[in-house]
Image: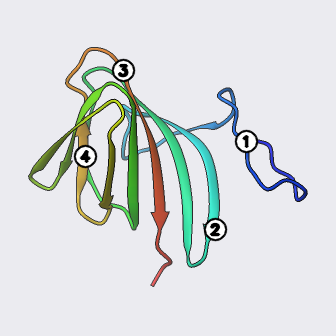
């Protein structure tokens, strides 16, 4: 990641980022890219690889979540609802709703996920 006070941007090269182990998503590969304060919210950005046939149980977060489907096709679950996401799709939802996912394919899928984390109350 490159950022200085003189520059008005942040550049994160493909080789940058840190692997982020997640107990709630052991089958998924999270790569942490960015965290930034925005008013009363915090922004957190991850690139996530979802291996073929991977499943993640329903969880909830204290964030609004925005996903961009980079590659592949997955099912995203919000409670009992199933939403099919394909390459190029964008999906936004309230992360307090229990949500999970399933890659039905044999090949990996990739998403860019942005968390807009609300302040603790």
Q: Badge 4 is on which residue?
A: 100
Badge 2: few (under 14), some or many (20 or more) residues near its Cα, within 10 Å?
A: few
Dot 2 or dot 1: first in sequence order is: 1
Q: Quadrant of the C terminus?
A: bottom left
Label 3 close to label 4 by CB (< 8 Å): no
Q: Quadrant of the N terminus?
A: top right
At mark 2, the secondary structure is: strand
Q: Badge 1 is on which residue?
A: 11
Which residue occupies the foreground of this view, 78 or 91?
A: 91
Dot 1 or dot 3: first in sequence order is: 1
Dot 4 or dot 2: first in sequence order is: 2
User: Cα distance, mark 2 to mark 1?
Assistant: 17 Å
Is 71 left, or right, of 73 in this rendering? right
User: Cα distance, mark 4 to mark 2?
Assistant: 26 Å
Dot 3 or dot 4: first in sequence order is: 4
Dot 4 or dot 1: first in sequence order is: 1
At mark 4, the secondary structure is: strand
Badge 1: few (under 14), some or many (20 or more) residues near its Cα, within 10 Å?
A: few
- Vertical relation: 24 (above or below) 64: above
Count of numbered circles on the image: 4
Badge 4: few (under 14), some or many (20 or more) residues near its Cα, within 10 Å?
A: some
Q: Badge 2 is on which residue?
A: 37
**How far across and how far down the image is residue 34, in percent?**
63, 50
Residue 57: name its quadrant: top left
User: Cα distance, mark 2 to mark 3?
Assistant: 31 Å
What is the number of the mark on residue 108?
Answer: 3
Dot 2 or dot 3: first in sequence order is: 2
In front: mark 4 or mark 1?
A: 1
At mark 1, the secondary structure is: loop
């Amino acid at each position: 990641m490159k950022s200085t006070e003189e520059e008005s941007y942040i550049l994160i090269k493909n080789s940058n980022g840190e692997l982020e182990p997640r107990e709630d998503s052991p089958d998924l590969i999270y790569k942490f890219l960015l965290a930034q304060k925005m008013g009363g919210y915090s922004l957190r950005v991850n690139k996530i690889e979802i291996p073929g046939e991977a499943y993640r149980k329903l969880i909830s977060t204290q964030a609004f979540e925005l996903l961009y489907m980079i590659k592949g096709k997955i099912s995203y679950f919000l409670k009992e609802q199933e939403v099919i996401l394909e390459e190029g799709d964008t999906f936004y939802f309230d992360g307090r709703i229990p949500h999970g996912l399933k890659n039905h394919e044999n090949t990996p899928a990739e998403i860019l996920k942005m968390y807009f984390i609300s302040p603790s109350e």
